Image: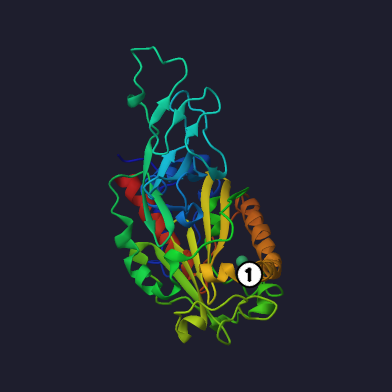
């Protein structure tokens, strides 16, 4: 079914990389409520998106909740070891079921105590015990299609989109030496709500040299020739846009020592150890492949000018068991704190500026190729949804 785009499709042409002077998306893409509703269907309703890592819920009954646009979701590890993504909405009158993360043997609605098993089947509804017109078996929590890729959990509301594994097969091979599927975070992902549009997170390193000159840049220098925007991970057709930061020595990192603090991932090549890969899997996952860990960022829409952002660092179990793990982890987070704050302030200031009547559609620089590639991917989705 075709849906109409509130911004004329012709206006997007100038934001594609097919144009030799690519400009930013129209400002309304970042604040217009009608465009937000369009995008929830055109992008979030018709493709895969990332909703965290299954390594955060290792045992049967472990769960976490996460919200994508208007959809509260519940991710639950089943007794058979698989993971299901369920609607976190009670099928009685729409009450939200669980919050945050935890462990449960069943899912109980706080309002009227309707109870579901971990797979979403209704097992108890008080007051209906003797009602012949009510069959528990008729009610279950809707399940959302999902796929696990290298420990990351992806979901889609579209039953017709191709399986994700094919789209990310090449990236899986490229990242083999990082052992991604086995990496675990010391604490579960906890996305936080912010007052800017989800597309503000689009990653580039043009700003690294300037905004982060005295923070990140003082620990990991980023001269323009350190940024390789044509690195091997790029795969436009499959929605993967990437750059690598080339270090001045092996195992470089933005820490007080200029090097990674945790044990080196054992299977990495010298080439892999000499660079950091910043890999965006559209629309909402950024993987940062480093010598001692893989960090990731996940962002989700929450409103025209609101979004959630979660950041997590994943390590091999051996690194997590190191006696000095927590000390090193806290040290590195402290070292990166200013950089992270600068980004948060920057995104918030973008949102304020982009809502102005004088908001621009400025030219993208040669150091923002990842943004141009992401715009291509988005515009393909806008056009496909509006012309079906
Ligand atoms: Fe930044």
The residue that mark 1 highlights is 325
At which x and y percent is residue 217?
66, 77
At which x and y percent is residue 272?
47, 81
Quadrant housing the C terminus = top left
Horizontal relation, residue 130 to residue 207: left or right: left
At which x and y percent is residue 251?
56, 82
Horizontal relation, residue 280 to residue 2: left or right: right
Quadrant housing the N terminus = top left
Q: Residue at x 56, y 83 (%)?
A: 247
Tell which of 106 and 334 is nearer to you: 106
Query: Callout 1: helix, strand or loop?
Result: helix
Q: Please, is residue 35 above or below residue 381 in the view?
A: above
Horizontal relation, residue 192 to residue 169: left or right: right
Q: Residue at x 40, y 27 (%)?
A: 123
User: Callout 1: 10 Å neighbours few (<14), some, many (20+)?
Assistant: some
Q: Quadrant of residue 117?
A: top left
Tell which of 58 and 43 is nearer to you: 58
Q: Please, is residue 172 above or below residue 88 in the view?
A: below
Q: Is residue 304 visible?
A: no
Q: Is mark 1 within 8 Å of ligand 1?
A: no
At which x and y percent is residue 347?
62, 57
Q: Residue at x 41, y 15 (%)?
A: 129
């Amino acid at each position: 079914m075709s849906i109409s785009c509130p911004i004329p499709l012709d206006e997007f042409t100038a934001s594609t990389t097919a144009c030799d002077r690519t400009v930013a998306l129209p400002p309304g893409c970042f604040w217009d409520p009608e465009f937000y509703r369009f995008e929830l269907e055109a992008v979030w309703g018709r493709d895969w998106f990332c909703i965290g890592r299954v390594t955060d819920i290792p045992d049967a009954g472990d769960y976490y909740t996460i919200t994508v646009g208007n959809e509260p979701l519940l991710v639950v590890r089943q007794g058979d070891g698989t993971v299901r993504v369920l609607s976190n909405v009670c099928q009685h009158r729409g009450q939200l079921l669980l919050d945050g993360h935890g462990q449960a043997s069943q899912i109980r609605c706080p309002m009227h105590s309707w109870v579901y098993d971990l797979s979403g089947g209704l097992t108890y509804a008080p007051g209906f015990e003797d009602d012949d017109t009510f069959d528990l078996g008729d009610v279950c929590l809707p399940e959302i299609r999902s796929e696990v890729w290298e420990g990351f959990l992806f979901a889609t509301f579209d039953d017709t989109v191709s399986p994700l594994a094919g789209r990310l097969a090449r990236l899986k091979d490229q990242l083999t030496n990082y052992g991604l599927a086995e990496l675990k975070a010391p604490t579960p992902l906890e996305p936080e709500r912010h007052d800017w549009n989800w597309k503000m997170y689009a990653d580039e390193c043009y700003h690294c040299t300037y905004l982060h000159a005295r923070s990140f840049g003082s620990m990991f220098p980023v001269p323009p020739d350190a940024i390789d925007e044509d690195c091997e991970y790029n795969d436009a057709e499959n929605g993967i846009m990437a750059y690598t930061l080339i270090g001045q020595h092996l195992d470089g990192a933005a820490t007080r020592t200029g090097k990674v603090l945790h044990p080196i991932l054992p299977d990495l090549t010298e080439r892999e150890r000499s660079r950091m890969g910043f890999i965006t899997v559209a629309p909402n996952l950024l993987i940062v492949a480093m010598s001692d860990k893989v960090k990731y960022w996940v962002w989700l829409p929450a409103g025209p000018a609101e979004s959630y952002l979660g950041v997590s660092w994943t390590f091999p179990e051996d690194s997590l068991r190191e006696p000095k793990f927590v000390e090193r982890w806290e040290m590195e987070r402290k070292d990166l704190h200013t950089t992270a704050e600068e980004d948060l302030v920057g995104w918030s200031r973008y949102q304020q500026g982009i809502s102005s009547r004088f908001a621009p559609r400025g030219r993208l620089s040669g150091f923002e190729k990842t943004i141009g590639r992401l715009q291509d991917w988005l515009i393909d989705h806008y056009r496909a949804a509006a012309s079906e």
